[in-house]
Amino acid sequence: MVGILVTLEGIDGSGKTTAARILEGRLRDRDVLFTAEPTPGEIGRLIRKEHLAQDRGPSRRMEELFLFVADHAQHLYQRIIPALDRGALVISDRYTDSRVAYQGVTLQDILPEPIQWIRELHRPWSVDPHLTILFRLDPALAVERCRTRPRERFEHEAILTQVARIFDRLAQEEPRRFLVIDAEAEGEEVAERALSAILELAASRISL
Ligand code: TMP
């Protein structure tokens, strides 16, 4: 695999999807695959309809994790790996860290060590990102930003506070992979920071 994998992570309302749209415009002249999880494919659609629209309760949470994992497997083998093999830059709006952070919260009453377990579940077969950009925003502000759209399952301050804590922990544990961006700034400014990190990484890989 000769390409570069960059993932965008953060709590709901952190502005990463807006940044992804700006990045798409700026990187138009390169071989870039812009993609996202959950995907728009069959499993991703099922997740949005069955699990994100409402909370189906603790008995559905393990099923939910495996749907996210199945969606990831399909995404990885059908889209990401082929793009990396041809040398493309792949930018994914959410990836495995979202599972670690969100399902790390939803499964905390079901499993003894959900964070560790979810990571181990991916480790032998998934592909690690070269760079993960974490859009960091105060959960209260993030919920405020989500107000203009119908509220999804996780868009509550108490949940996002726990999710944000896990993202912070992941970033602290892997400082070389993570770039943490203060997402409170204006959208263009946030996207510019992300763009310069991506271009820097692309340049360093070419010169290897
Ligand atoms: P979105 O904000 O990118 O539309 O993502 C939809 C929601 O799905 C968001 O609340 C985070 C959640 N999610 C998980 O819980 N686990 C996952 O593995 C992924 C990719 C997303």
Image (spheres, rainbow, N blue to C red):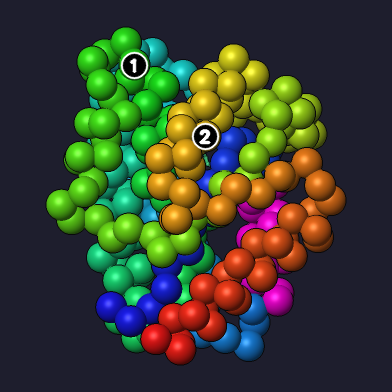
Label 2: element kind: helix
For image coordinates 23% across by 15% down, the residue present is: 112
* Residue at image coords 38%, 78%: 3
* Vertical comparison of 153 with 174: above or below: above
Question: Which amino acid, by three-letter code, is at mark 2?
Answer: Asp
The answer to whether any part of residue 163 appears in the image is yes
Q: Mark number for residue 108? A: 1
Q: Tag 1, which secondary structure?
A: loop
Sequence-wise, the earlier of marks 2 and 1 is: 1
Expressed as whole percent of the image width and height from the top left, the position of residue 88 reads 43, 81
- On residue 168, the disc is 2
* Membership of 166 in magenta stretch: no
Near-viewer residue (15 or 65): 15
Q: Position of residue 163 (x, y in %)?
A: 51, 27
Residue 53 relative to residue 156: left or right = left
Q: Residue at x 72, y 45 (%)?
A: 183
Identified by mark 1, the residue type is Gln
> Between 96 and 136, which is closer to the camera in this rendering?
136
Q: Write the start and end of the magenta stretch as one range.
A: 15-26
Residue 199 is marked as none
Name the spot of residue 118 as percent of width and height, x first.
27, 35
Disc 2 versus disc 1: nearer the observer: 2
| Residue 79 to residue 156: above or below | below
Q: Is residue 98 visible?
A: no
Task: Specify whether residue 19 is painted magenta.
Answer: yes
Q: Residues within 10 Å of mark 1 (few under 14, many from 20)?
A: few
Residue at the image position 66 percent from the left and 68 percent from the top: 195
